[in-house]
Amino acid sequence: MWTFGRIIDRYATDGYGPTVPTLRTIELAGASGELVGLDLNYPFDEGVSIDDVKKTLDAQGLKAVNITPVIYDRGFRSGSFTAPDEATRRRAVDLAHESVEVARRLGARYVKFWPGQDGYDYPFQVDYATLRRRAIEGIRDVARNFPDVTFAIEYKLKEPRNRLFWSTAAASLLAIEQMGVDNVGLVVDFGHSLFAKENPAEALSLAHSMGRLVDVELDDNYREWDDDLTAGALHLVETLEFLHVVNEIGWQEPLKLDLFPYREDPREAVRESVATLRALDEKAARLPLDELRAAQAAHDAMAVQRIIRRSLLG
């Protein structure tokens, strides 16, 4: 839903455009004509009830894909599940519990954690063992309280902290395994994977192979920051490979967009992303799989290059 809200950066601190209320963001999303659901931040605006959100979603033909508790704003500037004070950690847990109830009432598939403040900025600032223990135990304890609910963690290398605990696919999957619960998994965001200097298709395959893939998000960036540009704006071949793996693993859920159109019309950013993804998905579906797999089995880079060139360029 943030795609359709007011976007702020460190210089334009009053934001690009006016503040957009919760229900209006849902209406704008529906007006794009391309979406089937939304990732909803919680809490909603003051005075907006769960029933209000449900009615607005229904009116726009949208569903709640997941609920994302806002555990990353300035109220958690020193951490959420890893905060140094117990009261703040308790507040993060309470907000997670509330989000479960919201997800149930809206029929959302899962609750997503983006612990963007759970990390550090300077050497020696934290005790790493304590940070790890609190990060893992905080989410584990929430998951154990709701064994019938699916939870997912969206990893990111940095921002707003200079170092995040949930930083890469491999590090996050290792921490999830240490939780010892079955209902916590990973959101693989194409842009976050680029930003972490990963190969997004490989990260997606890894999460799926571990049985921990909960959701898939697409966007693009220059690999130096989480730019959240329209899908396929820069990395067409990597996006094609990512969609190929999406098809190979039999992913059945809708693909999600994580866009920050600072100066663009958000509806147009969504439409352009969807158009690009549909075109690339058609290319992925028509790849000569037998030929591709034979080339991959031989690690024949030039044979693969020819297949992809013909697919994209004819």
Image (tube, rainbow, N blue to C red):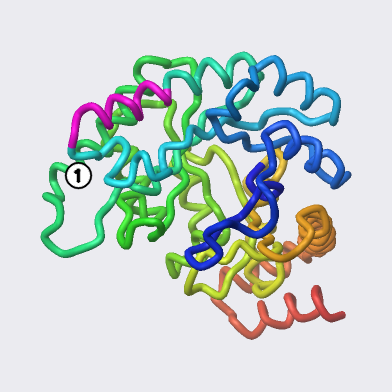
Q: Quadrant of residue 266?
A: bottom right
State whether residue 151 is above or below residue 169.
Answer: above
Q: Nearer the viewer, residue 243 or 51?
A: 51
| Residue stretch in magenta | 85-96
| Left or right of 36 in this view: 83 | left
Which residue is drawn at the image coordinates 48% and 64% (left, top)? 10
Q: Nearer the viewer, residue 58 or 214?
A: 58
Which residue is drawn at the image coordinates 64% and 85% (left, top)? 302
| Left or right of 24 in this view: 229 | left
Whether residue 158 appears in this view of the structure is yes
* Coordinates of residue 135 in the picture (x, y in percent): 27, 39
Which residue is drawn at the image coordinates 43% and 55% (left, top)? 156
State whether residue 221 is above or below residue 314.
Answer: above
Q: Nearer the viewer, residue 126 or 290?
A: 126
Residue sticking out furthest to the bottom:
302
| Left or right of 53 in this view: 296 | left
Element at label 1:
helix
Please tell me whether residue 163 belongs to the stretch shown in magenta: no
Please tell me whether residue 92 belongs to the stretch shown in magenta: yes
* Coordinates of residue 52 in the picture (x, y in percent): 72, 19
Q: Which residue is mark 1?
A: 131
Which residue is drawn at the image coordinates 57% and 35% (left, top)? 41
* Coordinates of residue 109 in the picture (x, y in percent): 61, 26
| Left or right of 268 in this view: 214 | left
Whether residue 286 appears in this view of the structure is no
Label 1, residues with CA under 10 Å away: few <14, some 14-19, many ≥20: many
Callout 1 amino acid: Leu
